[in-house]
Amino acid sequence: MELLWRGASDFAKIYNVPSTFDGTGQSIAVVGQSNINLQDVRDFRSIFGLPTNDPQIILNGADPGLVSGDEGESDLDVEWAGAIAPKAKIILVTTPFTDTDGIGGVDSSAEYIVDNNVAPVLSESYGACESGLGTAANAFYNALWQQAAAQASR
């Protein structure tokens, strides 16, 4: 059996997103470590019949530019957050990756979103297995997600 993917409407059906949900009044912060080409988002929205709604981009530090291997991830994350909630304010927070700050661009972006209470919803598609992270990294994520959850419940 062949699955024909039609975009946001299929995604919403597969994941039981209520048909009345369009993201009105909602903000979603997306974690990134690459900037994006806004035209990619515009093209995606046009192809799937979504309303025009450019994301806001927050540079946490210097502009990392379009980072090979990460730009596609940022594009997809911004596009699909906007596909599920087409009228929501989508905010990409992007931080350049450095080896000198002790945490990567993705972690710095997530930390920025939580510390600055950028949006009540945070989307992060990057990840790693907890058993491979070690004690310090697991403690970092545990504290950050606890802080995020506490802020969201206010």
Image (tube, rainbow, N blue to C red):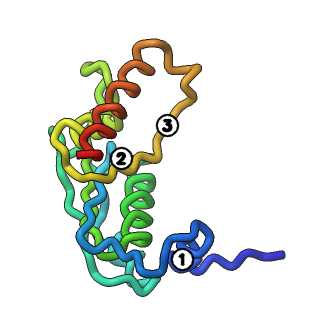
Tell me which numbered mark, 1 or 2, is placed earlier along the sequence.
Answer: 1
Query: Disc 3 on helix, strand or loop?
Result: loop
Quadrant in which residue 91 is drawn: bottom left
Q: Which residue is mark 2?
A: 67
Q: Nearer the observer, disc 2 or disc 3? A: 3
- Residue 139 against residue 70 in the figure, above or below: above
* Quadrant position of the N terminus in the picture: bottom right
Residue projecting furthest to the top = 135
Where is residue 27 shown, x and y percent of the image?
A: 26, 61
Between 153 and 127, the residue placed more toward the observer is 153
Q: Which residue is mark 3?
A: 127
Q: How many marks?
A: 3
Q: Nearer the observer, disc 1 or disc 2? A: 1
What amino acid does circle 2 point to? Val
- Residue 24 against residue 77 in the figure, above or below: below
Q: CA distance from mark 2 to mark 3?
A: 18 Å
Query: Disc 2 on helix, strand or loop?
Result: loop
Q: CA distance from mark 3 to mark 1?
A: 24 Å
Where is residue 115 shown, x and y percent of the image?
A: 19, 36
- Residue 7 disc label: 1
Where is residue 17 shown, x and y percent of the image?
A: 51, 71
What amino acid does circle 1 point to? Gly
What amino acid does circle 3 point to? Gly
* Residue at image coords 54%, 77%: 7
Quadrant in which residue 142 is drawn: top left
Where is residue 57 shown, x and y percent of the image?
A: 20, 57
* Residue at image coords 32%, 30%: 144
Query: Disc 1 on helix, strand or loop?
Result: loop
- Residue 27 disc label: none
Residue projecting furthest to the front = 154
Tell me which numbered mark, 2 or 3, is placed earlier along the sequence.
Answer: 2
